[in-house]
Amino acid sequence: MTTGLEIVRTVADLRAQVATWHAARATVAMVPTMGAIHEGHMSLVRQAASLADHVVASIFVNPLQFGPSEDFEAYPRGEARDAALLAEAGAELLYAPNASEMYPQGFATKVRVSDLTDVLCGASRPDHFDGVATVVTKLLLQCGPDIAIFGEKDFQQLLIIRRFVDDLNIPVKIVGGAIVREPDGLALSSRNAYLTAEERETAPLLHATLRQAAQEMASGLTTEHALESARAVLEAAGFRVDYLEARDPVTLAPVSGIVSAARILVAAFLGKTRLIDNVPVPPKA
């Protein structure tokens, strides 16, 4: 137990508390996380507290969304620290199930969203978004919140969640939370801890380069030229670009030429660390 924060580990206990709140006609917001809590997560909890009467946070490191060569075992874990930070931000209930509670023996169901999951991160991380869609579906159905908040740093994930919530008629409002950045522009991420000191100095160039490309597109430069220049800058600085693309901000369809609305999304390795970021293309200057 952490001061001001109750911890539950079963679906039954989670539902019992949420049912009590709903019986009192109170609204409930949920902020799902995989732990390793930082200011980005805390900003989502504070946003949730501003939108609902009660806030549930969850911590579950979901094995289904890690590939065979990815960092599931190495992913940072520290429940006591995370619980204290979530409580500080305004969470009242922490749902922290174990793997057998989330995926009991015989579990055989998968949630998959077509099209949106096959591009960008989905192209280089097969099955990743199936794991995300499956676990988020379960979390939303287990908790039954009125609102659930997900950060815009994982922009593709946010659109996928909105799609399956609409498609499956899950009665929850999905809200996006603004990207929280370090003073030098680097988007907050638990994986930033993997960067060496030298790589950490280089990392802010990722956001700066995206912003430059977005400004160029807003000024009338074609998508192709803006992205070609941005890729050259990143590669010269030592990034290994997985993808760097401009997409429709609602459908994720590719855009080309001179555009009036788009989202530039990137995934790039700096050393062994895979960083993602995205920025909107502002209205034409």
Image (cartoon, rainbow, N blue to C red):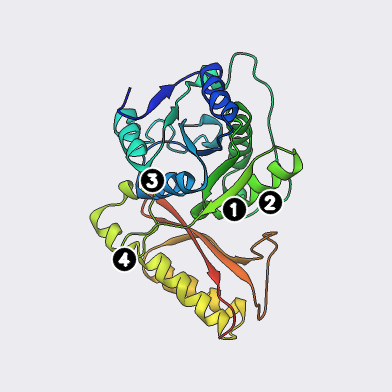
Q: CA distance from mark 4 to mark 2?
A: 31 Å
The residue beneath circle 2 is: 116
User: Considering only order in the chain, which callout, 2 or 1, is on the residue closer to the N terminus?
Assistant: 2
Q: CA distance from mark 1 to mark 2?
A: 8 Å
Work out which residue is located at the far left of the displayed protein and give it: 197
Name the mark on residue 156.
1
User: Considering only order in the chain, which callout, 2 or 4, is on the residue closer to the N terminus?
Assistant: 2
- Circles 4 and 1: CB atoms closer than 8 Å: no
User: Considering only order in the chain, which callout, 3 or 2, is on the residue closer to the N terminus?
Assistant: 3
Up the image or down, 274 lies above or below 13; here it is below
Residue 150 percent coordinates (x, y): 53, 47
Instruction: Sort mark 1 into few (<14), some (14-19) or many (20+) by Cα contacts within 10 Å.
Output: many
* Residue located at (55% from left, 75% from top): 282
The residue beneath circle 4 is: 184
The residue beneath circle 3 is: 42
Work out which residue is located at the far front of the displayed protein and give it: 24
Q: Quadrant of the N terminus?
A: top left
Rendering quarter of residue 171: top right
Residue 275 percent coordinates (x, y): 43, 54
* Residue located at (54% from left, 78% from top): 226
Residue 3 percent coordinates (x, y): 30, 28
Asked which secondary structure carries label 1, the reply is helix
Q: CA distance from mark 2 to mark 3?
A: 28 Å
Depth check: 241 or 94 in front? 94
- Circles 1 and 2: CB atoms closer than 8 Å: yes
